[in-house]
Image (cartoon, helix red, strand yellow):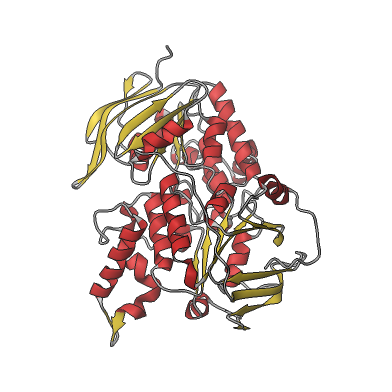
Amino acid sequence: MTEATIKLVGLRKAFGKNQVLRGVDLDLAPGQVTVLMGANGAGKSTLVKVLCGVHAADAGTVTLAGVAFAPASPSAALRAGVVTVHQNINDGVVPDLDVASNLLLDHLADGAGAFLNDRKMRARAREIAAAVGLEVDVARPVAGLALADRQLVSIARAMAQEPQLLILDEPTSSLSATEAERLFALIERLRAQGVAILYISHRMSDIRRLADRIVSMRDGAISGRFEGQPLDYSGAVRAMLGHEITEVDITIPTPGAPVLEARGLVLRPGARPFDLTAPQNEVIAITGLVGSGKTALAEVLFGLAQPTAGSLRLDDAPYTPRTATEAVAAGVFLCPKDRLINAVVADFDITRNLTLPFLRRHSRAHFLRRASENATATRMVGEMGVVCQSPADGILTLSGGNQQKVMVARWMAEASRLLILDEPFQGVDIQARRDICAKIRATAQTRATIVFVAELDEALEVADRILVLSEHSIVGAHRNENIDVAAIMAEVVDAAPETTRELA
């Protein structure tokens, strides 16, 4: 049997009274992709942070290539050959630096790049970028890049380190299908070179594509190990959740009166115009590849951007928001995609993050009523199943999936006319996704709801109607009953051009 690259025995970690890791035993073998599955709050991110030197374990041992391993910092872990791509994309990049500096940051920090001039740095950076298919000007600041390109910068930086152990935490959450396929090819190449790979994901498509073995985690401990072919995916999910997961049975309601009407909408110059009607009591999922225009449409509806052409009506009155404030005042709410960039306020607790857009509703005579805030936060934490000690916890003490639940809860805590959710399931586990879907559908009667998702499985779980977006235009519409998945996928990847479509 091949000796493990890294071996964990009895690993424990607590934050105050919260026991996050409860005696984790895990071996990671060279040349093997181990997929780690776990519900939000199971301890996955804490385990990763112990391995990469962010946190020190309270008890237990870790050995790397047979030698005791307890890195005092991320740089120490990196020097030892443990390379991590974190779920929080900004943990792997420095936004104020250019792409070249980011790609060579670890070399520069170790002094290896002290004698590199700009020309040599950029030439080397282009080589690193090309290895992962990153096509971007390496002199450009990372702050100006799209989320997917930031993710690729983080991945390219990691791949350049020649790791013994590569840890990837939800690496495809912001990548297109083409970009993800490039990543998979790189992972397979590293596996063939004998690198041990720990891959954390909730996406079954990723898991089926890559996994040599699956390890399930629940409540801070390993709850199941699955090896051999074929892998027991259902067993892995059951071990992760502690119960079976049932099939989703959607009953499609009768749509109500139109809430939102878009006519001749053009999202950018050269895009085809389209019409769209979102009625009350209907959940619409809009799906498409990364870059198809989902976020652009969400921003137009929320007043963050203006369309090139076309008109909008809300409740049969002209709707022309120029700011997010105007949109919220009209009853149009948006839960944005880039949680840590556009939504989470890192210095605030859960309660204040939840109530932030609606502080006037929790105020009297210009004084903020903390009791009113606490009541709303306690209610929404319970309804959304946020795993925390209390709503007074800092938002960054939560796992990424639980932070996402809080951001969705923020915009579901108050009544809206149009609720827009842009990739609301990023980083959440299968059961949490089902719970959020159920919450969206159970509260949909008094509003119109539009959910933007890249994964078709997510659209099928949440929607009454599915629209396909391609090249910044809607190209297909499908009621979510007896649905032709192949037809939707054909539209997603190769939509036929038409002039204008009415998709009400």
Of the pair 372 and 463, the residue shown nearer to us: 463
Judging depth in this view, the residue of 457 and 429 nearest the camera is 457
Q: Is residue 173 left or right of residue 3?
A: right
**The N terminus: image quadrant:** top left
Residue at x 38% of width, y 43% of height: 39
- Residue 277 point in image, percent of width and height: 64, 71
Res. 412 image quadrant: bottom left
Spot occupied by residue 185 in the image (x, y as percentages of width and height): 61, 32
Image label count = 0
Residue under the image location 27 percent in, 69 percent down: 375
**Is residue 36 shown to the viewer in this render?**
no
Q: Which part of the image, by quadrant, shows the C terminus?
A: bottom right
User: What x and y, as percent, mark residue 195?
Assistant: 49, 25
| Res. 380 visible in picture | yes
Could you tell me which residue is drawn at 61 percent across and 81 percent down? 320
Residue 244 spot, x, y in % from top left: 40, 39
Q: Is 59 on the left-hand or right-hand side of 83? A: left
Identify the residue at the far top of this view.
1
For residue 431, above or below residue 58: below
The residue at 52%/54% (across/down) is 250
Whether residue 24 is situated above or below residue 385 in the rendered picture: above
Residue furthest toward the left?
Answer: 17
In which quarter of the view is residue 362 placed? Answer: bottom left
